[in-house]
Image (tube, helix red, strand yellow):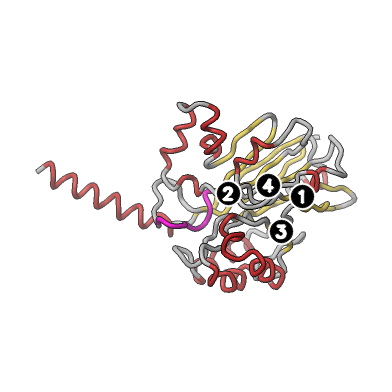
């Protein structure tokens, strides 16, 4: 009798784990900071990471996500890398992403899969989709005479990272947003790197929620190697806000348990 019960429970858990990758959610965060200019109070940022087009997420699913993002009417859209798992999916993925719309544009960094599978092809597809790269690059986002800085760094595993391309023309009082595909980059930042908000993906939320609790039991050097403390959600490190997305797709194993795929919606608030 017990064996039958275990088989039923195991089958139910497997069925749920196979279902959850298709159960998309919207996760909303509110970030308040004294360095956010008054003109950016209520500024809306949509963040998508780890699409991995062609696996659990195909044209119809990505089209729905794009529509959901556009319906939110974001001021800015940021993409966190790993758009595909296999090279053949680069063009169809960016065909769908080309429909993203935001007042201040759509900006992106590369992920490890994009670099390995076809960096040049991804860059070309990105340009055709009117998505601008901020890989080791930056720009000022301006509104009503005020501005915030947006920058990005290359993938931690497959590229170099040049944070100076983001901070070279900033002052302490500027609000700076950095996109890094891999959240482990937070350990590379120095005190003088005055980054206020870091957006990352890569981890997929570990795809199994219990893994995030391991950070409480492992030594710090293991944490730095695996970023267990930054697998999912909003965290704080040395005064910086860090948001790590579960991603919207899956790679390799098409399973998720209590780490639902998500589109991240962030609203900035000034409390001057």
Earlier along the polypeptide chain: callout 3 or callout 1?
A: 3
Q: Which residue is mark 3?
A: 107
Q: Nearer the viewer, mark 1 or mark 4?
A: 1
Q: Is residue 123 above or below residue 231?
A: below
Earlier along the polypeptide chain: callout 3 or callout 2?
A: 3
Q: Residue at x 61, y 44 (%)?
A: 29
The label shown at residue 150 is 1
Identify the element where label 1 is drawn: strand
> How many angstroms separate mark 3 from mark 1 (CA)?
9 Å
Boundaries of the magenta span? 246-253
> How many angstroms separate mark 4 from mark 2 (CA)?
18 Å
Identify the element where label 2 is drawn: loop
Earlier along the polypeptide chain: callout 3 or callout 4?
A: 3
- Callout 4–callout 2 Cβ contact below 8 Å: no
> How many angstroms separate mark 1 from mark 4 (CA)?
15 Å
Quadrant of the snapshot with the C terminus: top right
The label shown at residue 201 is 2
Earlier along the polypeptide chain: callout 1 or callout 2?
A: 1
Magenta span contains residue 83 = no
Earlier along the polypeptide chain: callout 4 or callout 2?
A: 2
Q: Residue at x 37, y 57 (%)?
A: 19
Magenta span contains residue 250 = yes
Q: Is residue 251 above or below residue 9?
A: below
* Res 20 quadrant in image: bottom left
At which x and y percent is residue 223? 53, 33
> How many angstroms separate mark 3 from mark 4 (CA)?
17 Å
């Amino acid at each position: 009798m017990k064996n039958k019960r275990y088989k039923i429970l195991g089958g139910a858990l497997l069925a749920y784990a196979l279902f959850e990758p298709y159960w998309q959610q919207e996760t909303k965060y509110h970030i308040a900071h004294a360095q956010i200019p008054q003109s950016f109070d209520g500024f809306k940022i949509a963040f998508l990471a780890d699409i991995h087009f062609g696996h659990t997420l195909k044209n119809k699913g990505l089209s729905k996500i794009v529509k959901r993002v556009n319906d939110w009417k974001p001021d800015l859209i940021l993409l966190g890398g790993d758009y595909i798992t296999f090279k053949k999916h680069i063009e169809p993925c960016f065909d769908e992403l080309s429909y993203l719309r935001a007042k201040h544009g759509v900006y992106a960094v590369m992920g490890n899969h994009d670099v390995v599978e076809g960096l040049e092809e991804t860059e070309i597809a990105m340009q055709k989709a009117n998505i601008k790269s901020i890989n080791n690059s930056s720009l000022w986002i301006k509104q009503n005479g005020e501005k915030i800085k947006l920058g990005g760094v290359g993938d931690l595993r497959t590229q170099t990272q040049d944070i100076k391309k983001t901070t070279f023309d900033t002052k302490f009082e500027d609000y700076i947003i950095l996109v890094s595909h891999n959240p482990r980059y937070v350990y590379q930042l120095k005190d003088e790197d005055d980054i206020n908000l870091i957006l990352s993906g890569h981890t997929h939320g570990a795809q199994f929620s219990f893994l995030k609790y391991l950070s409480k039991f492992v030594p710090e050097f293991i944490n730095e190697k695996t970023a267990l403390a930054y697998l999912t959600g909003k965290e704080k490190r040395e005064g910086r806000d860090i948001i790590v997305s579960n991603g919207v797709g899956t790679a390799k194993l098409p399973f998720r348990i209590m780490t639902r795929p998500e589109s991240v919606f962030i609203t900035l608030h000034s409390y001057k």
